Amino acid sequence: MSGVWMPPAPNTKGSFMTPSLNRDGIFVDDDGVKRRTILAGAAWSIPVISVVTAAPAFAATTDLKLAFDKSSYSGEGCKTITGVKVTATRNGVAAAGESVTVTLADGYTFSDGSTSYTATTGSDGSISLPDIKVPGRGGNSTFSATSGSASTNATVSGKPTGQVYASDGSLYGTDQPNSFTSIQTTGKTVWAMDSDKNVWYVNSYDGKWTKVTNATDVTQYSVNGGGATYLKGGKVYNSEGSLYGTDQPGTFSKIQTDGKTVWAIDSDSTLWSVDSYDGKWSKVTGGTNISAYSLNGGGGNYLKDKKVYSSDGQLYGKTQPGTFTSIQTDGATVWAVDSDNTVWSVGSYDGTWAKVKNATSVSGYSVNGGGANFLTANKVYSGDGELYGKSQPGTFTSIQTDGKTVWAIDSDKTIWTVNSYDGTWAKVKNATNVSGFSLDGGGAAFLKPACS
């Protein structure tokens, strides 16, 4: 090979023969072959042979990927979601032998009541989850899966369930559909809406729950003072399923009734009512660009530019602070809360607005049937600013009154009321894990999920 020095063959004594070098820098072997080399100082220069390995066009990834078999799931309260799987892959190939943990939240549990499940992927890279129980309240949540640094999520939604109970803790009526999401009562009649937006009531003849005529796909309803109406497709219907009044604009978004009168607000925040003379819908005087309204006991008021007006469009009372954010009326009394969460009312003597005693930092209030109560620091007070009843737990979060009775729900979703015998607060029978309640006209009912 030209340019590469080869060691000389050993001599007969086993040592290497060293070729001689002439003055031209040419080695001359014993066999007379001349070989040119380069002499650099006193050192030999030996070529370095480099071995180069070609790099691959791309590097293989080892990232693990997880995926649920669906991006979202759905179910019904108290029932189960079955067949959920999680698959692990690497480079699009099933990854066997990987430990995967799935976590549930918001009341969703596995069949054994736990909220976490761990399993190892099989040859197909997947794990199959146990049945998942949907909470009675339903609701939206997220399923989460992790394996090392890999993770993935899937959303879940559950239809809520609910059953209506009377004030004595017994089921109200018979043949309940077990899917109620809200209730309203007048003390004589109870209406409830189910998860499919159908309105039901208890038939007074046989006590069975029955759908209200034409009350499907309902957006809102109002039951008060012996009257009931509902809202559907931007229009108001009476309890018989017929359009209420004439000349409706078809743009209503919210309604209230007190059994005598119906008020409705349209998409432009304008208030309407039915004229008692001709039954036609017409705009309430001055009731444009309103922010709130209240109709009860034959009286109605609305809130506009943070001031309270009566149904004739006149300012209600004197010396309003101009900072009101919400109102309630029972036809005889009007209460309003300002931007500092202080309750005000109109003095019966001079018609001047004044702060209710101790009603600061108020978190809730209720005015109905000639009675008024407010909630502050998780305790209930009467209209005179004194603690209402005895032995309050100090954990109340909302209240309702009908002027005769007060109900309050605590932070554990348990309903309490004041014992009429000794004025002591006590829990309402069976009223635990409550999702809603209604108190009016001397009657009360509550709603709780069909399962825990």
Image (cartoon, rainbow, N blue to C red):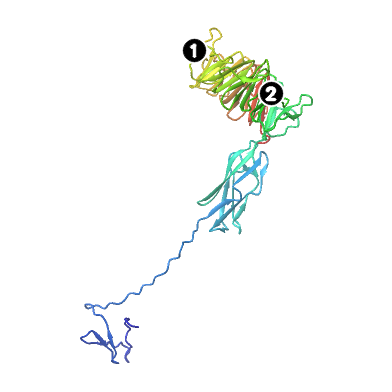
User: Residue 146 or 355: which is nearer the viewer?
Assistant: 355
Amino acid bearing label 1:
Thr
Q: What is the quadrant of residue 9 in the picture?
A: bottom left
- Looking at the rendering, in which quadrant would you find the C terminus? top right
For disc 1, the neighbor class at 10 Å (few under 14, some 14 to 19, many from 20) is: few
Q: Is residue 306 visible in this depiction of the protein?
A: yes
Amino acid bearing label 2:
Tyr
**Secondary structure at numbered mark 2:** loop
Numbered disc in front, either 1 or 2: 2
- Residue 74 image offset from top left, x and y in percent: 64, 43
- Residue 189 image offset from top left, x and y in percent: 71, 23
Q: Disc 1 or 2, which lies upstream in sequence?
A: 2
Residue displayed at 72% across by 34% down: 177
> From this viewpoint, which residue is outermost toward the top?
349
User: Residue 2 or 178: which is nearer the viewer?
Assistant: 2
Residue displayed at 31% across by 82% down: 5
Q: What is the quadrant of residue 326 in the picture?
A: top right
Q: What is the quadrant of residue 8 in the picture?
A: bottom left
Residue position for label 1: 319
Residue position for label 2: 244
Establish if 63 lies above or below 56: above
- Looking at the rendering, in which quadrant would you find the N terminus? bottom left
Establish if 448 lies above or below 119: above
User: Residue 418 or 150: which is nearer the viewer?
Assistant: 150
User: Residue 127 or 260: which is nearer the viewer?
Assistant: 260
What's the distance in space between the residues labelled 1 and 2, CA to CA?
A: 38 Å
